[in-house]
Image (cartoon, rainbow, N blue to C red):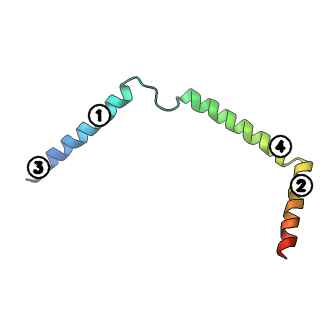
Amino acid sequence: MDVLVSVIEEGIHMRRLSALWRRCRDGRDRGMSTAEYAVGTVAAAAFAGLLFKIVTSPEVRKMLLEIIRRALSLVG
């Protein structure tokens, strides 16, 4: 009986794998390709660099420190 259950379970797994394989090879574009990931990563890194430059600029740093000082003076 255990062998029969095992064979049936294997059949279910094989059908699921087969369906997954058909979906993967059906030619539809699902998600990003490696090149798109690379472009997205470069864009995200460039944006992060730009934000870093903006936030660490003296004007923005002064503004942020002033906001923090005001918030702390309201609390204490």
- Give the number of the disc on residue 19: 1
- Percent across and percent down for residue 51 are 78, 43
Q: Earlier in the sequence, mark 2 or mark 3?
A: 3
Q: Quadrant of residue 40?
A: top right
For image coordinates 84% across by 70% down, the residue present is 72
Amino acid residing under circle 4: Lys
Indicate the secondary structure of the residue bearing disc 1.
helix
CA distance separating discs 2 and 1: 57 Å
Mark 4 lies on residue = 53
Q: Are marks 2 and 4 in contact (CB under 8 Å)?
A: no
Helix, strand or loop under label 3: helix
Q: Is residue 21 left or right of residue 48?
A: left
Binning the other alpha carbons within 10 Å of mark 3 as few (below 14), some (14 to 19) or many (20 upward) gives: few
Callout 2: SS: helix
Mark 2 or 4, closer to the camera: 2
Label 2 to label 3: alpha-carbon separation: 72 Å
Earlier-in-chain disc, 4 versus 3: 3
